[in-house]
Image (cartoon, grey):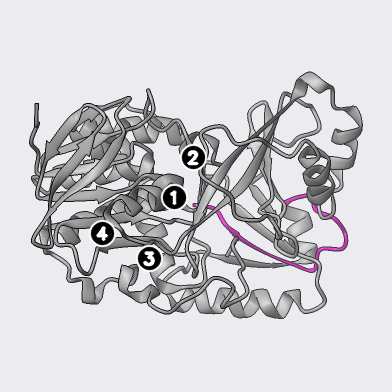
Amino acid sequence: MAPQADVIIIGGGISGASSAFFLAQAGFKSIVVERLSSLAALTTSQSMESMRAQFVEPENIAMMRESIAFYEAFAERTGLIGYDIGVHQQGYLFLTAELDGWERFRQRVQNQRHMGLTDVELLDGDAVRRRFPFVAEGVRAATFRQRDGWLSAHEAAHGFIRASGAEVLLDTTVTGFSIRGGRISGVRTSHGPIAAPVVVLAAGPYCARVAALAEIELPLQVIRRHRLTIGEHPLIPQDAPMTIDQDTGAHWRPEKPGAALAWAQPGEPPSSPSDDVSPNPMFPFEVLEGVSRLCPFWVDVAESLKRDQVFLTAGQYTVTPDDKPIIGPHPDIAGLFFNLGYSGHGVMAAPGGGRLLSDLISGRISDADNPFSFRRLAGLEFGARERTRLL
């Protein structure tokens, strides 16, 4: 059999699901091809499920603001009346104890406001401790935005697919591309060929491997990232925001009735894509020490934790040289598009990324006006700039 569609989407995570939804809104019939036996079961399920607009680049701020606004009205925007994706807008709180922290944060907030993010608050040490009593005395400055927060990424991904009406093929592996005369005409899979004039690659950490089937080398690295979930504990403030030590990157947020903790630690080497990422058994000790630096109550939490309250998992970021996604067409193969490489920001950017992809495929936007174009990466190498991944 050779089923046909307007668009084939390779990957059933939240980026692929969002792509299917926005393409359906533009009148395209999609088939989602997922290698695993369920949707959103790989990187989406291992994420911190967060959303924030506190970035420093105008294109990232615009995409995240659009995405957050969509998530705030998810049921209405998708037509799934009463559908709940568990949005918690308890804010994002960035903290610094550095001597120059106040001036750096002041300049950052000033720039963000110039770029339209007018609701970011700048707080000195005393003000942040009045608002958030768990913050350490050594904190000199903070920024806070109330509309940032987190959601259920699994529910959002399934909602996108449900609202899209897309056909979903699970347990189906893409084994090759059909390309004739420089134009895509479909894919070959473990269950036979599928025909379509447009193919979208949104396969998370497996994107480079799938692209290689078409002799395309994508500038991507796959990096292991951990998530520590702590069960119910009376010392964890459940009304707290996502709280980030900007100086180190260690961060945490409530996850009723406990918390979720993470740390994009520097020095983690690139790895191969994997369905089952082995975590570092020392990570719970490292991240608890990391978050306690500016939030001292974590010392007491750590001292009273029991083994059955601690749950450690690991997933993978798919990272580009400039930490921004690749969205849009391949320059030499007509009909082949990308929606990948979100560098740890896939959940929070999924609606904006899916909408942009749809506009590029439908011709409403030219790739020349696309800040996330594949073309921008020509000659850009990893390590070319110091990363501030949380920003």
| Gap between marks 2 and 1 measured at Cα | 9 Å
Residue 15 picture location, percent across and down? 35, 45
Q: Indicate yes or no whether the magenta region holds residue 284.
A: no
Would residue 352 be visible to someone looking at this image?
no
The residue segment tinted magenta is: 132-147
Residue behind mark 1: 346
Image quarter where the N terminus lies is: top left
Marks 2 & 3, CB-CB < 8 Å contact:
no
| Gap between marks 4 and 2 measured at Cα | 21 Å
The disc, 3 or 4, on the residue closer to the chain's N-terminal end is 3
Residue behind mark 3: 62
Element type at mark 1 = helix
- Work out whether residue 309 or residue 51 is closer to the camera in this orientation and state it: 309
- Work out whether residue 55 or residue 47 is closer to the camera in this orientation and state it: 47
Tell me: 24 left or right of 214.
left
Marks 2 & 1, CB-CB < 8 Å contact:
yes
User: What amino acid is found at the position of numbered circle 1 in the picture?
Assistant: Gly
| Crowding near the residue tagged with mark 4, few <14, some 14–19, many ≥20 C-alpha atoms within 10 Å | many
User: What amino acid is found at the position of numbered circle 4 in the picture?
Assistant: Leu
The disc, 2 or 1, on the residue closer to the chain's N-terminal end is 2
Residue behind mark 2: 43
Callout in the foreground (2, 1): 2
Element type at mark 3 = helix
**Residue under the image location 14 percent in, 62 percent down:** 334
| Gap between marks 3 and 4 measured at Cα | 11 Å
User: What amino acid is found at the position of numbered circle 2 in the picture?
Assistant: Thr
- Work out whether residue 154 or residue 197 is closer to the camera in this orientation and state it: 197
Residue behind mark 4: 356
Tell me: 113 left or right of 250.
left
User: What amino acid is found at the position of numbered circle 3 in the picture?
Assistant: Ala
**Residue under the image location 20 percent in, 56 percent down:** 336
